[in-house]
Structure formats: C-alpha cells, structure tokens
Amino acid sequence: MSKIACSDSRYTYYREIRNGSLQTIDVHEIIVARSNGRIIFLCASILLLLLHVSNLAYLMNQESQVIYIVGALLLSILVIISSQLRVVQKERVVIMPAFGVQLETYYWSGRVSRRLLSVGKILRPVLNEIVTPVRCYWSLALVLDGHEELMPVFQESQPPVKMLAPIWKALCAATGGEE
Amino acid sequence: MAEKTAPARAVAERKRHTILMVSDFFYPNFGGVESHIYCLSQCLISLGHKVVIMTHSYGNRSGVRYMSNGLKVYYIPWRPFFLQNTLPTFYLTLPIMRNIFIRERISVVHGHQAFSTLCHEAIMHARTMGYNVVFTDHSLYGFADIGSIHMNKVLQFTVADVNHAICVSHTSKENTVLRSGLPPEKVFVIPNAVDAAMFNPAPKRLNCDEIVIVVISRLVYRKGADLLVEVIPEVCNLFPNVRFIIGGDGPKRLRLEEMREKHSLQDRVSMLGAVPHAQVRSVLISGHIFLNSSLTEAFCIAILEAACCGLLTVSTRVGGVPEVLPDDMVVLAEPVPSDMVLAIKKAIDRLPSIDPHAMHLRIKNLYSWHDVARRTEIVYDRGRRCSDENLLQRLSRYLNCGAWAGKLFCIVMIIDFLFWQFLQWWQPSEEIEVVPDLMRAGCRRGGTMPGGNVEKGRAQSDSLG
C-alpha cells in the first residue's frame, strides 16, 4: 500500500495502491477544501435579506409582520440547507483493472453518489480543455462505447491538470489505451 | 548534435513569438479576412512561431479545436449578435481573455478587422495588461455616414495605444491613418497573397471562339452588383460570342435574374449561386476574363486569385485595386457602366496575347504567404522593442482622441485597469495553468504551403488522448 499526495489551495490529491489478493486496486482521491468565503458570503446575503425584510415589516400590521418574518426565516434556512447539500467533500476514482472503474462523489451532507463503468465500456480517457464565457480549465473525461457525449470523471470539482494527469495515465494503463 | 533547419536556426536567433490572432471572422466562415488569418497563421507556424486563434462560437462549434499543423482555435461561447459580431460588452470578455493570454503564454496579440467587436475588446484588454498589440485593417471605410462616424471613433479609441498597425494596401493605409489618427510611421503595408498551389491555370488553354467572362463575388451593393445589371446586357449586345458565368449569392441576385429574364439572356448568363471556396478555382478556369465591379476594395484578393488562374482581369479603379496587379494583367475602368463596357472591349482585344501559365508564374513570384509572414514577423519584432509604459503614460494617448471622447476613453481604460487588478486578486496568474506546448515538435514541417497539400479549413476536434 503506498500513498502519494500533492495539493494546492483548493484541492488535495491522494493516490493509494492497494494490493489485493486477486488484483491491485488503484484509488485516486481529490479532496475539496471547504470554502469559508462561500459560507461567509452566503450568511452575509441571508443577513442582508433579513434586514431588508425587517424594514419592510414595519409597514405591515402585527399579524402580517409575524407571518412575513417567519416566512423569510424559513426561506433562509431552506437556502442554507440546500446549498450545503450539494457541497462536495471529495471525489474518488477507483480503478480495478480487470473489472472496471468506479466514480464516487462524497458530499458534506453524508450523501455518496457512485457509478461503476466496466473496462470494456471505456474506449478512451481524455484530457479536455473546457472553455466557458469567463474561463478555461482542464477536465478529465471518458469516451464511452455507445455514448455520444463524454462522461466527466469529476462531476462537481475542477482539479488542476497536475492532479488529473496521473489519473489519466492510470486510466490509460487500465483501459489498455496509449498515452 | 543534430543540425537545425534554416527556419529553426533563424527563429532561435530571433526569438519565438506566441501570437494570438483575434477576430470575429474565422472558419467555418469563408472570406478574405478568414483566409488571411488562416494562411498567415500557417506560415507563421512554419517559421517556428506558435499561433493561437480566438473567435466566437459558431452554432455547436464551441470550445477548443485544432486545425492543420497544430493551429489551436478557441471558439469562446459568446454568441454573435449582428453580422457575425459578438455583443460589445467592454469588460465582460476580460476574464476569458486574460485566462487565454496567461495559459497560452501569449507575447503578441494581433487583432483583425475594424468591424470586429471581439478584436477591439481584445486590443483594449491586451494593452491594459501590457501585451504587445498589432492591428490589421482589411477594409476601407467612409467618413460621412453615421455608421462610419461611430466606427471611426471606436477605431480611434482602440488603436490609440497599439504598438503597430498593418494595412493591406497603401490606399488602405491612408484611409486607416485618416480615420484613426494613428501616426503613419506606426502603420506598415503588407499586402495579402494568394495560394498559388491551389489557384493554377487549366492545363489546356481555352478556345477563344467563345469568350467567357467570370464574375465571382457576393451579390451586394458594395460589390457593384448594380453595375453588372447595366453592363451585362450591353456587352452581350455588342459581342455575340461572349457569355457570362456569375458565381455568388446575396440580396442583389434577384436583380440579376430579372435582368436575365428581361433581355432573354438565359443561354448567355449562367448563375451558379453560392460557390464553395474549394470550387472557386474550377469556376475561374472555365473563363477567359474575370470581371470585378466592386465600388470599394482595400485590396481585392479575388482579382489576385483570378490572375493566378491565368485570367485577364477587368476591374473598377477603386480603393487599393490599382496596386494589386501589373498593368498588363488588368484593365481598369471607372465604376460607371459605359467605361466598364469599354474596358471589357479592351480586354477582349488583348486576350490573344495573354499566356495564362506565364501569368501564374509571375503572380506566384510576386505574392506569397510566406513573404507576408516574414514581413509580419518583422512587425512583431519591432513591437517587442517598444518600451513598457505604465497606465498614466498610456492614458495621455487616449486624451488626444477628442475633447470629450478622450476623457470618456480614459475613464473606460481606468475601469478596465481596475477590473484587471480585481481579477489579479480574485484569481492570481499563478493559479492559471499554463498549457503545455505539445504541438511544437510535430508541427514544424519546413514550409508546408497552406492549402497546397493540406485541406484548408478542415477543423478537427482533438483532445489529449
């Protein structure tokens, strides 16, 4: 069993090779650092909303004030909860050469999303450059047999290419493709 | 130790540039500007430089694409909103442009065409970030109408701070200098060229019993389609052995078809519709004379292509057209029907003395994209020698743009500078990953002619895999 790690301000990359009795399992893990700035921004926005609501509540009668403030508080709580539900804690790629590749996404809420792809279904792993209206970044994706669209390996996070490159190489080796 | 090729040695001695060509006009559109950008890029790559192109997305064509010889194209997902131009937002393109400038390690930003909003924004942002900037103007514009007045003011603002400008003819240089207020010593004249391998004459010379006049252009007002409506019936009346082939499409097509019906010229005037660029040569070599009736042209690549195919050219004497061809290859006329008919008569009389293959060889020696690339490289080298200036020094140039406009332009640039500083804090340059230069080893093929044995315009999506 061996571990290799590299990290930057947002992501930490771990690689673990487990020598099992039947085959070697290659685990690549990207841990996403929790963004305090995002939480502060969210709380500040909620606070501003509540201040605005309380200003408006002065214009209403007492009954309406209570309903209005309670409604705003409930809405704020819902927004905070729903935003936290989708925050990713880590993403993992488990490569079992003779079997397949499992893509796992762990959320801070405790939810885990898994998807298993058999080796035969993966035609080729590719490193793509994604262009959005405001930035460009690298993405690791899989070309799947019978699918027109690429499947991104990391569904939620966007790790840097220095972390994607060893994962891509490992996937190439596992699927029998050339680098 | 392996010997370097001559271009590689020369580049090592000079220094390699990483050039970003920016324009709203590129493949899959076909046109003069598009061809210019593509051919120039290919020749710069063969000289050892790295070239990246940035344009807007075309339908589903969005993201990164690779063309021949590793030419990388960014189709940024900003949709065109008017005549293939992206919506001018001033500042919203700064994040993506900054990202591309840093990740590709750009050294020179080269904008094309005054009518391209993406080009203007790229020049503005590049100067804010301190990059060398070159601007190429491909067209002539007026001074009197409201559209031209606004366009010229925008151009004045954009090019106030560029390192150098390139124009495709001396007439175009005069026009650009007057419109933009650029000092003439900053403007270079580098004409367009033609791909002689792609445009060559027919192996066998055509019979002169029936004379075929070819017209290939967009059928719009500024290309003189209305002149054709007057000229064609007159010529058909005077010369019974002349027929016309008209390739191209546009709003004036209907007028030409009406003219054909009115004078019963269906058997003497063939209308082909839009001709794909790959088939232009096959249409040209079916004729003896090429007719150009443009009302304004900065250069006119079309007559160059026609001459390269061995056709004698009849053209209106407008803009930069007189600078393109030697006098024995072209008959010039004023843009009035009577003068054009006389010019066609002169051309018909001159036909027996024309040797298409000799004409092709002369054009091949006169115009070459490799020569254009070498001259453009000199402009880039000059730009590198320009000193770095801070914001205050550069703002003084914008103040010269006008009493009120100057101050407004300064405010725009100051806001751009502040936005850039914000982006430097929000996403430092160190966090933007530099793209590895993977194509360099594979793309140096020692002078591959663009469009010769390479399928011009074939874009292929490629990933590192």
Image: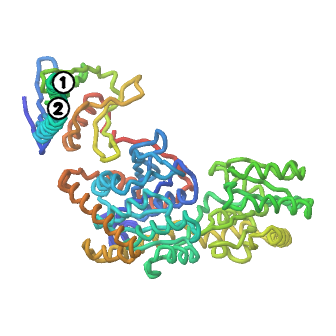
Which image quarter is the N terminus of chain B in? bottom left
Which image quarter is the C terminus of chain B in? top left
Q: Amino acid at mark 2?
A: Ala
Q: Nearer the viewer, residue A152 or A55?
A: A55
Q: In this figure, which colouring scheme has been used for the structure?
A: rainbow
Q: Residue at x 11, y 20 (%)?
A: A20
**In the visual, does B401 lie left or right of A113?**
right
Q: Amino acid at mark 1?
A: Ser
Above or below: residue A134 compared with residue B158? above
Q: Which image quadrant is residue B384 in?
A: bottom left
Distance of label 2 from label 1 (alpha carbons): 8 Å
Q: Nearer the viewer, residue A35 or B103?
A: A35
Which residue is identified by label 1? A64
**In the visual, does A179 lie left or right of B200?**
left
Q: Residue at x 32, y 29 (%)?
A: A151
Above or below: residue B411 compared with residue B270? below
Horizontal and vertical percent for residue B420? 25, 59
Horizontal and vertical percent for residue A82? 19, 26
Badge 1 element: helix
Tell me the chain of label 2. A
Badge 2 element: helix
